[in-house]
Amino acid sequence: MNEKFIEEAAEHFKALLKEQIERQERMEKAAVKTDFNSIPKLTIGLIDGDGIGPVIMAVAEKLLNELLKDDIASGKAELKKIEGLTIENRLALNKAVPDDVLAEIKKCDVLLKGPTTTPKGGSMESANVCLRRELDLYANVRPVSIPEKGIDWCFFRENTEGEYTLGSRGIELSDKLSMDFKVTTDAGTRRIARAAFDYARANGKTNVSIVTKANIMKKTDGMFSRIAHEVGESYPEITADDYYIDIMCANLVNEDIRSKFQVFLLPNLYGDIITDEAAQIQGGVGTAGSANIGDRYAMFEAIHGSAPRKVERGEGAYANPESILKAAEMLLRHVGKADKAERLEKAIALCKKEGRVVMTGHADGATAAEFGEYILEKL
Ligand code: IPM
Ligand code: MG
């Protein structure tokens, strides 16, 4: 029994290794970046997602339609609804992202996506993880800003490697032993490190914190840390510091020192965890936006999940759309429409300041749709 398992596992591992070596080699080839100034028509795909997804996406769609109405009317932009990325459809087809849905998605330039439900356990991969891989969205960029506390952080989370690459393809010996695999590559680390340092340079930041657990994950995180520092050497005006993820989690709640951090560069799983912490410090995971950026495509989404329990309680309509609107703002900036992003940002800030319509996330506050109307009024 064990012998057979070992043999099968070794074969499985061999296949994974081959595949990952090929992936690393593919990444080494120069990538072509989409130039949004030169594409004749910008196609923005809208994916509702599950749970509270359709509620918050309806608000985003309405506001994007208004902000982009001239471009849409003149055929320079299109908002394209992508159907079928629902948990029901995915489970029925046993596909993280059904083929026809992926084909539609690939016809878009950028995407705005509501949260999708990820089944726990089993072998069904998360739709997010699948899309990040299929569209090669290697940089997960998550800004957190609390001006009154001097906090202006931007997290650059590696988005296609680490624990996630093979997260659904570990091995199991009949419930007695389980192993997952973590992958770090030279090319994969270099490109996210460049994204972080380029951002720092373009935004007048002076420091990047490289955060790993290289004292324990010696091969993978060790490599990430080494290459990140090496990339940083090409940016002499920016200092690079090294931290372990555990103490960095503590630092973020340490009011004496946290405002000195500027840009964070981390492997996938640590980036996942710490960005929820950071969003909570900002006011909740409902307040943060998230960009998944690759060379060809980019996908923008709320940082939070689909909140199925909220929907079960009958409170779905009261879901806060702020996170998806932050994502929409990031999308507009990414495609070179910073003026429109600013209009949206200012309108939201105005609504929150004036407070005629207030969301609490529950039935004692406004619905997402009501809040959306309020923002529309202020645009
Ligand atoms: C995120 C989410 C995803 C992740 C889930 C939904 C797969 O938590 O975007 O941070 O783990 O990356
Ligand atoms: Mg997360």
Image (cartoon, rainbow, N blue to C red):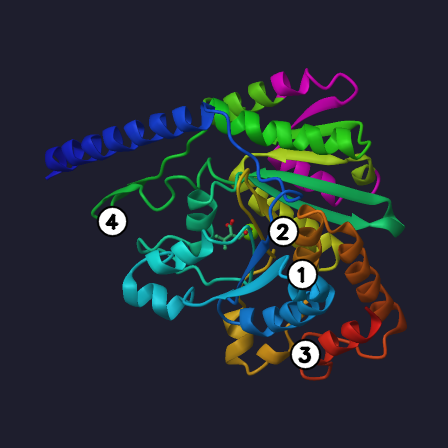
> Quick check: 246 left or right of 337?
left
Of the image marks 2 and 1, the number of the one nearer the N terminus: 2
Q: Position of residue 237 (x, y in %)?
A: 79, 19
Residue linked to disc 4: 175
Residue span colored magenta: 229-256
In the image, what residue type sits under mark 4?
Answer: Asp
Determine the residue positioned at 79% across, 39% down: 258
Give the secondary structure at mark 4.
Answer: loop
Residue linked to disc 2: 290
Disc 2 within 8 angstroms of ligand 1 (CB): yes
Which is more toward the observer, 169 or 340?
A: 340
Residue linked to disc 1: 323
Report the disc number at residue 369. 3
Q: Is residue 103 above or below residue 85?
A: above
Judge whether residue 246 is colored magenta.
yes
Which is more toward the observer, 338 or 244?
A: 338
> Quick check: 66 left or right of 305?
right
> Dot 3: within a 10 Å radius of its alpha carbon, few (fewer than 14), some, or many (20 or more) residues?
many
